[in-house]
Amino acid sequence: MSHRASRVSRTVLLGALALVASGCLPVPVTEQGRDVASLYDLFMIAAAGVFVIVIGLLAWTILRYRGAPGRDAQLPAQTSAKLIFEVVWWTVPTLLVAVLAVLTIGVLNQVDARAEEPDLVVDVAGYQWGWEFTYRDSGVVVNGTAADPATIELPVDRTVAFMISSRDVVHSFSIPNFLIKRDAIPSRDNRFDVLIEDEGTYSGQCGEFCGLLHSRQVFEIRAVSPDRFDRWLADQEAATP
Amino acid sequence: MTTVEQPMPDAQRRHVLKHADDGLIGWLTTTDHKRIGILYMVSAFIFFLVAGLMSLVMRAELAIPELQLLDLQTYNQLFTMHGTAMIFFFATPMVIGLANYLIPLQIGAPDVAFPRLNAFTYWLFIFSALIVFGGFFVTAGAAAFGWYGYPPLSTKTFSPSVGADLWVVGLLLSGVASILGSVNILATIFALRAPGMTMFRLPLFTWNILVTSILILFSFPVLGAALALLFIDRNFGGSVFTTAGDPLVYQHLFWFFGHPEVYIIALPFFGVVTEIVPVFSRKPLFGYKAFVFATILIGAYSFSVWAHHMFTTGAVSTVYFAITSFLIAIPTGVKFFGWIATMWRGSLWFATPMLYVVGMMAMFLIGGITGVFLASPPIDYAVHDTYYVVAHMHYVLFGTSVFAMFGGLFYWFPKFTGRMLDERLGKVQFWLLFVGFNVTFFPMHQLGIDGMPRRIGDYAAERGWNDLNLLASGGSVLIAVAVLLFLWNFWTSRSLGLPAGDDPWGGHTLEWATSSPPPHHNFTSLPPITSDRPLLDLRVRGPVRQGGEPVGPSEDERAGADDGGGRG
Amino acid sequence: MGAAVAEEFRLFFRTALYVGGAGLVYWLVSLDAPGTVLLVALTLALLAFVGMAIFLAPRGAGAEGRSGVLGLLNRYIGFHEPVDAAPPLESGPELVPLGSAWPIITALGMVVIGLGLIFGAWLSLPGIGLVVWGAVGWLTQLDRMG
């Protein structure tokens, strides 16, 4: 490898590392989100590997086999296909993809798992342009509009099931820090479960375009300790006429 | 084959008619595939400029938080029409335009199979595009429900504007045009090949167009059905996709069309790359049959992955669609390695087309990799409908298709006009576009990961999306400058460019065996066709002695080498 | 069926095999009606082209190559084309076409019909008129070319 080529491949490598470092998900705060984040990291390692190898190969080929410009330049040796190469590059991507598929299915089962008896069930209804949250056991209802978005509290360390539906068009119930979203589709209920692990305030937003004020169909989730949550829920219940 | 040139049969010559006049009437009534190809390409490029202008306005709005330039209704119309125009009125017609011009030349035919049908599809496409854009001039404005128009949002209740009806009818008609166009191309490739041009000697661009045409033929009717039902829902009291029916069925129908559509836009440009790489490496393509097989495989796979656009609906088999989507990475990867292997030990000439093609490969690599991320449902749950998808999609559709398109335009412009585009300007344009594109779209990956949803006209300052949005908007200005530079280059080179001659690049395929631009009947004589690269064969073998055997490796040896690759 | 199948149609057959298989697996794993219907319909549509291939194939040709299952696979889905064995489906002197105003008139008519669906049936009438005029002109022009 020429000096220039090695310098280029070093630059490519550094670039790829920078890519990995920059491509980080937001800090996941749920059990399920952490699974997704670790899957994402594995994908990122595979991606960086593929990127470095392919771009390195491409860059090296470009630098090594540069020829004279012009249509009448000397022709190089007219080599054609070699079976061994083809076998290699049909096999390698197949294996890589198979590994990624197996990893995916493992995490998918965890993310899609549903608790048989969740500690808390929240009905989430999307509409143009806001969200309504109904705490199933206590009957507490919190709703919001584009001008006055809803803010709800949820307990950490308890399984929460969101039952998602829509009153008009397709929306998507999405919380970036949970690394999950599910569409709210009229006439079809959806569900996902989370176990929040970290206290904090997390903003959420409609993911699927739903009309004029789509960009303002936001809400906020405050994840608090179970004790504080119980007090909050009791306060809400008392405030409800 | 004992002679270099096969004279055209007399019967063919006798029917060569006087070229239609160059006036307006001549262009309006033309049935010459080359003129129709140019009409397609120029119109598609104009729609590219219009839709690009819309995106510049949107980027200007998004540069800083909150609303400044536009109101939300206008923003929603803009992104809807941007997507619609780029997919249906730029990318697809650009493909059909290139195919129109090049397919008959590449297979050694005097025209397409149905020349007047060809003219009909062009005019139908242009009129339907005008109908869709007409939405901007009706009272309630153009369609504003995203380019895939999910009901119930796209039903009359939520989108009462006439602009939405214009959108549905316009797309329906342009779909009809695309289907007829694909029939024409299929018939041309199947029935009008020159003697000796067997299916496995078709240039790879033609192969990609062939598979693309099959995708169009079988996917656009599904779109047509979805749009027709949507129209019935909107105007004739239907309730197929309303809450009383099932809105999800529309999503199935739309993406059953929509995913093949991605390949309808991508495959032909893979074909362009596969044409350019061997010419500028001065070598035969590495593994012809592997390329053909990979192309067919991508086409077939594309019909079984539609619902990976619907993972978050929670109503589809995520495992099935994850696996089928992953599978597409394999033949695409094979193409990639084939390109690199063709360059390997070649003698690379970095003229502008090759520069674009290498740029395309780098961009396509990123787009392909993020595609694998999105094929994994858990990751898709996190980043679906965010700017991550916007970034991925633009790496695939802009980084891949538009870069390859510019490569193709620089490569074939001499054939179209007889003059070269300016190489120096072309290289400056490439670097501007390359930098501008990456500055615009790379930060969007991070924005998406940070949770910024797509299709929002404003965002709150405290969400932490400000810096990257400003950066992306800055990059879009560079893209605009690059495109303006191309326009300037195009405009001046048309009449002032260096004369190109018949074959300025040392091309491999038949279009370079005729004059630039080709005569009305395309060829006065054809070289012998014994492989997918007849012109390279001539150069490799040297002059053929009259009545003697050609110098150099015989056809059997070469075919043997090719077959070895094909079995891989 | 000893007839050789042209590569043009094997292309459809291979795709049909894949899509048919994908449809079967899809039904088994998802029991989803819309998707399965789409995949089955697509398989049938692709097979229609294969039917055409068998209809159009030259009788008696294609006995070359291996027999048995491998030969059958090679014949219907293989990636092999005997050198110079596959002339274009139809050859003969091609005509270079005359210019024609009928395509643009017919296209305009179709668009006017489309607009009629939106703005009122009255608008469709001139559209139908244009289409009929265009089609008649189109077809009679064909006679003059022959």
Image (cartoon, coloured by chain):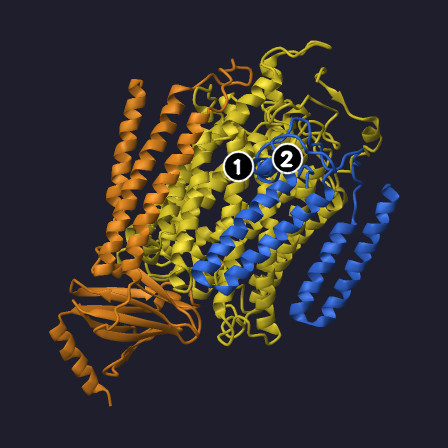
**Badge 1 amino acid:** Phe
In this image, C93 relative to B69: left or right?
right
Give the residue pinned by disc 2. Answer: B102
- Callout 1 crowding tier (Cα within 10 Å): few <14, some 14–19, many ≥20: many
Q: Is residue B60 above or below residue C61?
A: below
Residue at 62% x, 17% y: name it: B538
Q: Which chain is blue?
A: C
Instruction: Where is residue B175? Give x, y as percent.
Output: 62, 55
Residue designated by label 1: B293
Q: Chain letter for yellow?
A: B
Q: Quadrant of the N terminus of chain A?
A: top left
Q: Is residue B492 left or right of residue C128?
A: left
* x then y, percent, for residue B285: 52, 26
Residue at the spot 55% in from the left edge and 18% down from the top edge = A71
Residue B258 seen in the current view: yes
Local crowd size for mark 2, using a 10 Å CA cut-off: few (<14), some (14–19), many (≥20): many
Q: Please state, as top left, top right, bottom left or bottom right, where the C terminus of chain A lies in the image.
A: bottom left
Residue A99, percent across and down? 32, 44
Q: Secondary structure at mark 2?
A: helix
Q: Amino acid at mark 2?
A: Leu
Instruction: Write down the chain letter for disc 1.
Output: B
- Choose top left, top right, bottom left or bottom right for residue A169: bottom left
Return the disc, 2 or 1, that comes first in the chain's sequence: 2
Q: Position of residue B339 (x, y in %)?
A: 46, 30
Determine which of the numbered discs, if any, sits on residue A63 in the image.
Answer: none
Look at 36% across and 24% down and name the residue there: A60
Left or right of B185 in this view: A231:
left
Which image quadrant for residue A108? bottom left
Which chain does tag 2 point to? B
- As drawn, the residue found furthest toward the bottom would be A241
Q: Is residue B274 left or right of residue C8?
A: left
Q: Colour of chain A?
A: orange
